[in-house]
Amino acid sequence: MVHLVGSRTLRVPPDGINRENRSHLERLHRELPTAFYVADAARVLDLDLDRTRRLLGYLARRGWLSRIRRGLYVAVPLDTRRPGEWVEDPWVVAQRVFDPCYIGGWTACEHWELTEQLFRTVLVVTAKRVRDREPVLQGLPYRVTVRAANKLFGTRPVWRDQVRVQVSDPSRTMIDLLDDPTLGGGIRTVADILSEYFRSEHRNDTLLVDYGDRLGNRAVFKRLGLLLEHLGVDASELEESCLDRRSSGLVALDPSVGAKGRIVRRWGVRVNVTLGVPGGEW
């Protein structure tokens, strides 16, 4: 049987669901097209929380809903041939679970085509308090980084399955990677990504400085200045801006690595990682 809902054609599930539950399911599809919590479903279905919780559990066990995490569900498309294997777009899941947030780090690098490496883990930056920084949702791993709400700037909206999701723009992505190289998979990968950024149409030296100032971590400018020299990037004004913003003391090129290394005093950076990129090795 086929039902028309708005502009969409919904295929009613096969036998095994009664008329009342079928009506509930159609309403969830119509009014909650993205991931929803039990309270959202209770409001839409005009049911109390306990009954709604039991209903959603039943529908999830039968494969008509997908359980993202405890108390969070998404309606499986009714024309899905293998509903038990269906998963929601991971960016949409991130937006629903971690809002306010943006997609960042290596995931943003893939989006902007600044790396050819493929990362299975979805990287999310959020202002929400999160205990589990490496959750698995619908079988897919996420890495979550928490920042203050006023640090969620430099993003652009993209549409994913009719849902508006924020992703860090290319320049903000570079600043995030320089602030915490693990967000790019380590400083070696960050150097490669940064090199690609400066060769791409995304390059914006003024925006890099502005974002670095707003983030407020001067170690960003130390790492950026050193990598500009090492990569041989023609950016004299940007290099001067980095020099003007150096802080006192030493920072590690890659804080996640404990190894010792030579000190480049011009930038106040301990080069604790060997970089095999154009310009030679440190």
Image (cartoon, rainbow, N blue to C red):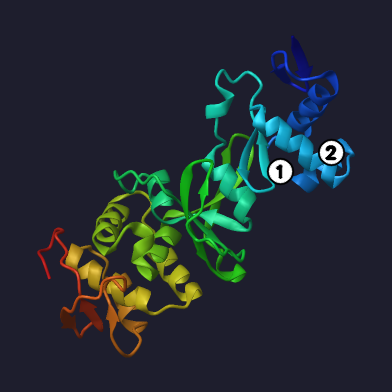
User: SS at mark 1?
Assistant: strand
Q: Residues within 10 Å of mark 2 (few under 14, many from 20)?
A: some
The label number, if any, that marks residue 82 in the structure image: none
Q: Give the residue type at disc 2.
A: Val
Residue projecting furthest to the top = 1
Q: Are marks 1 and 2 in contact (CB under 8 Å)?
A: yes
Q: Which residue is mark 1?
A: 36
Residue projecting furthest to the left = 280
In the foreground, 282 or 98: 98
x%, y% of residue 200? 32, 49
Where residue 160 sits, quadrant-wise, is top right
Q: Give the residue type at disc 1.
A: Phe
Q: Residue at x 55, y 34 (%)?
A: 87
- In the picture, measured across the screen, residue 57 lies left or right of residue 86, that is right
x%, y% of residue 48? 88, 44
x%, y% of residue 235? 27, 66
Where residue 267 sits, quadrant-wise, is bottom left
Question: On the rendered image, what quadrant is the C terminus found in?
Answer: bottom left
x%, y% of residue 268? 25, 84
